[in-house]
Image (cartoon, grey):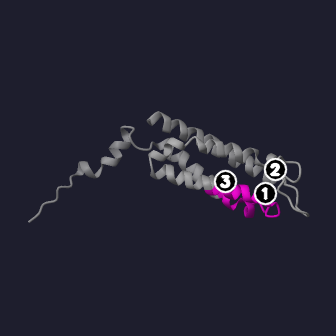
Amino acid sequence: MTTSTTTRDTVHEPARTRERGGGIGGSSEFSTGLVLLAGVYLILSPWVIQFTGTFGMAATNMISGIVLALFAAGCARSVGLRAVAWVIPVLGAWVIVSPWVISRSRGLVPLDYPGMRDLNTATWLSNVIAGAIVLVAGIALALSARRHR
């Protein structure tokens, strides 16, 4: 006859670790969630805002969104990946400035083709708001990662 060696104390160990500051805190989880949601939004934004005619913006939003979603998922799963959480605010800043950098023949990197439409107000606002959310949440995540080191 075998007896169970699992006690109530060992079952609740992750909660205790989190309370002592060894795990991901509540604000880190919230920041990670915001970055993940903003990343998913950026992936879908060319179809939500309907700026599929502007290839450069669609491509940069999709690539930035995929990278942000992967970083957020990685930071949520691995404490070690939080050491590179400083990349998230940098990507947030890129999302904010990308409409000015990549726009029809006025940007620094003109990725246009004949017949390409200009960026509309919804595209500009979408990127600035999503980028600001990523920037603020990324700074909070990077600061909490630095504090836990």
Q: Does the magenta stretch include residue 60?
A: yes
Identified by mark 3, the residue type is Ser
Number of labels in the image equals 3
State which region is magenta: 41-66
Identified by mark 1, the residue type is Gly
The disc at residue 149 is: none
Q: What x and y, as percent, mark residue 55?
A: 79, 61
Residue at 69 percent of width and 42 percent of height:
93
Q: Given the current orientation, which residue lies at the most extreme right position?
A: 115
Is the magenta region chiefly helix, strand or loop? helix
Compare residues 113 and 41 and report the one nearer the observer: 113
Residue receiving disc 1: 56
> Looking at the rendering, which quadrant does residue 86 occupy?
top right
Mark 2: few/some/many CA within 10 Å (<14, 14-19, 20+): some
Identified by mark 2, the residue type is Val
Residue receiving disc 2: 109
Residue receiving disc 3: 64
